[in-house]
């Protein structure tokens, strides 16, 4: 089975889902409308995907010395990954609306944690929906 480490297209993802244990993570978010990502996830998402809340799962609370979305504390983030069913052997595919910026944040965070088997869906949910 091929392991994906960076970008994956929709055809590759369809093939991967047919043969592998893969965890899909919906990273959709809108900085101007914080609840939009969750609402869109609840309205429809890739099969079996879990929702990654930018403000809750992918960041620690803002402090007087932090930026907008400070990295979460390592052990807390590890607990989030475990709650999503992600182990070091899990192939993870992150996606967002289309441009990949928020999916890339999760990709980077997983790599930061030493997780090698993570990719970003090229074109996000827009590309998935376009495949029919």
Image (cartoon, helix red, strand yellow):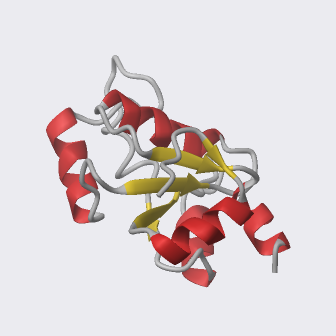
Pinpoint residue 61: horizontal percent, then vertical percent.
Answer: 31, 39
Of all residues, the one furthest to the top in this rendering is 65
Pinpoint residue 39: horizontal percent, then vertical percent.
Answer: 58, 74
To which quarter of the image does residue 114 belong? top left
Check the image and report above or below for 68 versus 26.
above
To which quarter of the image does residue 37 belong? bottom right
**Quadrant of image for the C terminus:** bottom right
Compared across the picture, whether 77 is left or right of 109 comes to: left
Residue at coordinates 48% horizontally, 31% vertically from top-left? 68
Residue at coordinates 54% horizontally, 80% vertically from top-left? 47
Pinpoint residue 120: horizontal percent, then vertical percent.
Answer: 59, 47
Of all residues, the one furthest to the right in this rendering is 130
Check the image and report above or below for 105 versus 66.
below
Residue in front for this viewpoint, 100 or 70: 100
Of all residues, the one furthest to the left in this rendering is 75
Residue at coordinates 18% horizontally, 52% vertically from top-left? 79
To which quarter of the image does residue 23 belong? bottom left
Pinpoint residue 92: horizontal percent, then vertical percent.
Answer: 44, 54
Compared across the picture, whether 73 is left or right of 6 comes to: left
């Amino acid at each position: 089975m091929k392991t994906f480490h960076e970008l994956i297209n929709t055809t590759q993802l369809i093939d991967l889902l047919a043969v592998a244990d893969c965890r899909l993570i919906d990273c959709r978010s809108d900085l101007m409308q914080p609840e939009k990502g969750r609402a869109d996830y609840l309205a429809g998402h890739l099969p079996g995907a879990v929702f990654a809340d930018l403000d809750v799962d992918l960041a620690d609370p803002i402090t007087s010395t932090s930026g907008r979305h400070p990295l979460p504390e390592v052990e807390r983030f590890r607990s989030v990954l475990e709650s999503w069913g992600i182990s070091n052997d899990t192939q993870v595919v992150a996606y967002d609306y289309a441009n990949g910026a928020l999916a890339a944040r999760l990709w980077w965070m997983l790599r930061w944690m030493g997780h090698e088997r993570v990719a970003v869906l090229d074109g996000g949910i827009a590309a998935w929906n376009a495949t029919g």
